Structure formats: C-alpha cells, structure tokens
Image (tube, grey):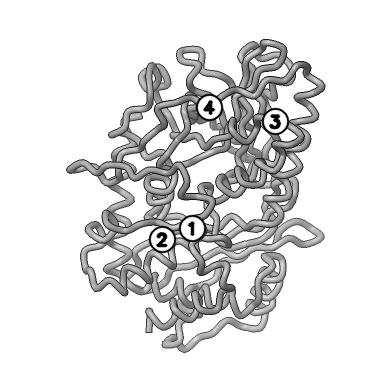
C-alpha cells in the first residue's frame, strides 16, 4: 500500500518533474569521497577562484544589481521551495531497492535535482542558469557566478576560519549564489539566497561602505521577526559572516551566525548538501511571492510515533494574515476510518490553489507522506542518520 501511494503521487506529476534536472546541474559538480565513520561524503571545492566582475562606477553596479534582483524575484514567485519531492523520491527508490539498511542505501544513493522540486541546491542552480542570460548586458557575469557552501549555527568563528573549511566536520547544509565584484577598485561580494526566500541582492563590501547592504528585515510576522546582516569575516576574508537576529513577543532576542565560504566554487552541492537534506527531520513545500514572503504551503517534522499520530501544518494567505491549522497524516491513509472533514477539505483546496497545484496532487502527496510516516523502520533509521550528522556539526 505504501509503494502504491508513492507511485500514484509521482506518476501524477508532470513529465518535467520526473525528468532529472541534470543538464544544468551536473556540469562542474563532483562526487565527494566517503571515509569510515563519517555520515556524509566529504565536500569538495574547486582549485581555482572565480574571476571578479569589475564595474567602473557605483551606478553601473546598481544597474547590475537591479537586473539580478529582478531575476531572483521572478524565481521566488515561479518556483516553490520544496524539500518534500526529493524525500518522496528517496523513499520510493529505497523501497524499490530491496535494501533493508537505510544507512547502506544512503551511501550508494545518487541524489537528483528535478525541475519542479527545488531545495536551496536546485534553486541555486536554476538562478545560476537564469543569470547567465544577463551576460550580453554585463559581460563576464556568466563566468563569475558560482555556488558557495554555508555552515549554519557556528559557535566559534575564530576556531572555524583560517583556511578552507574542515572537510570532515560540518554538514554544509546550505548553498547560495555568489559573484565577486570590484567597484572602482573596491572589493566586495554579491550574494543571492533563494533557498532562504531572500528577494534582494546582498552586497558585502570589504570597506562596509555603500552599496554594502548591512542589516535588513527578512521577515516580520506577528509571531517572529527575522533580521539578517552579512559582512566579511575580520579573521579571514575568505568567509562571509551571516548574522541572524530573531525577535519574538515575550522572548529574549536571539542571535546566531553562519559562515559562507566564498573563496572558491563549491563542487559537491548535490552529493553533499542535497544528500544531507534527504535525511533532515523537517520538510516543507512553500510558495513565495516576489518579495520573498512565504504565502502558502505545508510543513512538518519527521518523528517516530508508534501510534501513527504524526501531524503537519497547512497554511495559506487570507485578507487578515495567514490561516494555519494542524492536520493528522493518518486522515490521508486509505486504511484509516476518519477522512478530512468539510472545513479541512476547503483548507486543502485553498492551499493547493495558492501553491499553484491541483487539489488531487496535494492529496496524493499527503497520502504518500502518510505512508512514509507509517513506516516506523524507515523513520527510525532516517532519524538516526540525521542525529549522526547533527553530532558531526556540533563541534563548530
């Protein structure tokens, strides 16, 4: 029954979904070596540095940034952020393999980037592709753009930097698009982050003068305000520090920092970062508008519950903010006696409309996810791999 549910969902997708999106992603990508005792392949960076794009004046850079920002905003609107599609494919391939040990299958599995199901990796590759079309107007941008790796939640910046990232510690769980720039001899970095729904160009100047971006509000909702700031690391300019400030009503302000290694192109975005995402315990499918606001979708945590009481949150935009409720996965199991009620079906219909997918596709997806959540052996093994990866990164 589980395999039937998964196949039904995948077969219901468009041919573009099922075709591996490798034409744009495999070029320049590498396989990372595995070493004993490490739950991920080792990351690999290029031996070369990408050339900086030189512009004569700040005004010319503003023109460039405006064109890049427009393409980024179009991408956010046209492509959902999706860590569910790759999860469903991973489970389908695992069950079809006949392998019982998920860890062994995980090491052999080759992650794919598909056209309609984009994590930060797929979104990064798609944005790279789109921005190369600007090369006629801005010669040199196509050869200068590249993906960069990001390690989140760094506790000891000084201990982490000072040379390339340590290959055998950390998970490199995020990627961004990068372009080195030089404006009238002033050195800087352009960063783009469609995976975190950032709808603007982030400019990081070494001297922190205009057009340096500085602090900006990424999202501001009644339950949480997030502000971001990016600057070159004082201890090692091969890294950009990404500071996040999170403010919630009635809670202390929280700060955390991530490090983005910008010195050289990151070559294992698929083999390491996409692979890491496959076993992450939080999954989501999100629609964004051109400003990067998350407007509709579903999200959930993968948990082991022997009573099959796992839930997901579904939400969509209304005239008065967001409507958000929790629903039980088992309502979408054919073997379960209780189905979604009329109100829940209306919520499903509106969420699907704002996600720009059919209601049947959304229901099929939830049925496929319900089948996975009921597979306690798979869930337990997946959470064990995720825990090993988290332990690997705790030393940072």
Q: Position of residue 13 (x, y in %)?
A: 56, 74
Q: Which residue is at 44% across, 80% downward? A: 5
Which label lies toward us, 2 or 4? 4
Q: Position of residue 130 (x, y in %)?
A: 66, 46
Q: How far is the residue under mark 2 from the one under mark 3?
A: 46 Å
Q: Which residue is at 70% across, 36% downward? A: 135
Quarter that holds the C terminus: top left
Which label lies toward us, 4 or 3? 3
Q: Name the residue under label 4.
A: 50
Nearest the viewer among 182 and 135 is: 135
Q: Name the residue under label 2.
A: 302
* Nearer-N-terminus badge (4/1): 4
Q: Mark 3 points at which residue?
A: 139
- Contact? badges 2 and 4 (CB < 8 Å): no
- Contact? badges 4 and 1 (CB < 8 Å): no
- Contact? badges 2 and 1 (CB < 8 Å): yes
Is 179 situated left or right of 113 in this image?
A: right
Q: Mark 1 points at which residue?
A: 283
């Amino acid at each position: 029954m589980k395999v039937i549910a998964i196949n039904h969902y995948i077969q219901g997708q468009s041919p573009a979904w099922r075709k591996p999106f490798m034409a744009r992603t495999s070029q320049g990508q590498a396989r990372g070596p595995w070493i004993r005792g490490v739950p991920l392949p080792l990351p690999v960076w290029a031996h070369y540095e990408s050339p900086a794009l030189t512009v004569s004046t700040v005004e010319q850079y503003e023109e460039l940034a405006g064109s890049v920002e427009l393409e980024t905003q179009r991408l956010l609107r046209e492509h959902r952020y999706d860590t569910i599609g790759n999860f469903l494919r991973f489970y389908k391939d695992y069950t079809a393999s006949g392998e019982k040990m998920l860890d062994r299958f995980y090491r052999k599995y080759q992650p794919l980037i598909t056209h309609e199901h984009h994590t930060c990796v797929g979104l990064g590759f798609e944005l790279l592709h789109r921005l190369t079309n600007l090369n006629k107007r801005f010669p040199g941008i196509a050869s200068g753009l590249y993906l960069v790796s990001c390690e989140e939640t760094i506790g000891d910046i000084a201990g982490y930097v000072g040379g390339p990232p340590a290959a055998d510690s950390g998970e490199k769980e995020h990627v961004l698009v990068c372009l080195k720039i030089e404006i009238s001899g002033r050195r800087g970095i352009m960063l783009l982050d469609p995976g975190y729904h950032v709808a603007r160009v982030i400019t990081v100047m070494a001297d922190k003068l205009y057009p340096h971006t500085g602090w900006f509000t990424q999202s501001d909702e009644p339950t949480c305000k997030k502000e971001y700031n990016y600057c070159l690391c004082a201890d090692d300019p091969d890294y950009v520090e990404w500071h996040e400030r999170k403010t919630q009503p009635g809670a202390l302000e929280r700060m955390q920092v991530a490090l983005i290694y910008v010195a050289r192109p990151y070559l294992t975005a698929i083999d390491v970062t996409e692979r890491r995402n496959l076993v992450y315990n939080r999954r989501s499918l999100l629609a964004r508008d051109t400003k990067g606001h998350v407007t509709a979708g579903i999200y959930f945590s993968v948990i082991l519950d022997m009573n099959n009481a796992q839930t997901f949150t579904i939400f969509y935009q209304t005239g008065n903010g967001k409507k958000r409720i929790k629903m039980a996965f088992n309502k979408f199991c054919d073997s379960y006696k209780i189905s979604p009620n009329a109100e829940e079906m209306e919520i499903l219909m509106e969420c699907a409309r704002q996600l720009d997918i059919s209601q049947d596709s959304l229901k099929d997806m939830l049925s496929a996810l319900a089948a996975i959540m009921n597979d306690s052996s798979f869930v337990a093994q997946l959470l064990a791999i995720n825990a090993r990866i988290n332990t690997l990164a705790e030393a940072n």
